[in-house]
Amino acid sequence: MAPSTEAQSPEEYFELLDEPRRSEVQQLHEFIRATVPDLAPVMISGMIGYGPYRFRYASGREGDTAVVALASQKRYISVYVHAVVDGQYVPERHKERLPKASVGKSCIRFKRLSDVDWDVLGDILREAAHHGGAYAKE
């Protein structure tokens, strides 16, 4: 189950999760921190974010988000990646390399950690850190 948006830190977020989800989310958090250590962790929109930034679309809509975000959903663990290369979201660019995951434009969803291809996820995170903070045009 998704923890309350009241969590003020990653540690509080973890504490709101039941096992085995708590350990799985902590393991992904540690992997993200080790893979892209320059993306500072923050709590944003009820998720753990890494690499906070402010976005603004050409339409004028703006807000706060992070290059990468991690969330425990009811049925999935989601990794959101807000980076675009050549007009395509980074997760979409690697979709075929993640056959056990559900991949949308900027979201990668895993039912269990055994579905994670750590090498591919690492490639995605590093690419996002390099190109992060970019959205496709609204």
Image (cartoon, helix red, strand yellow):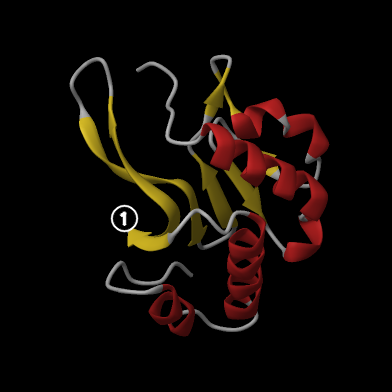
Judged from the image, the secondary structure of the residue bearing numbered disc 1 is: loop
Q: Residue at x 60, y 54 (%)?
A: 36
**Outermost residue to the front:** 38
- Where is residue 45? Give x, y as percent: 31, 55
Question: Is 131 on the left or on the right of 60, as rendered?
Answer: right
Q: Is residue 4 above or below residue 116?
A: below
Question: Is 112 on the left or on the right of 109, as rendered?
Answer: right
Q: Residue at x 63, y 46 (%)?
A: 125
Q: Is residue 93 above or below residue 72?
A: above
Which residue type does callout 1 highlight? Ser
Q: Is residue 136 above or below residue 48?
A: above
Q: Residue at x 57, y 36 (%)?
A: 130
- Where is residue 110? Give x, y as percent: 67, 54
- Where is residue 131? Give x, y as percent: 54, 31
Foreground pick, 108 / 38: 38
Name the quadrant of the C terminus: top left
Label 1 CA crowd tier, 10 Å (few <14, some 14–19, many 20+):
some
Label 1 belongs to which residue? 45
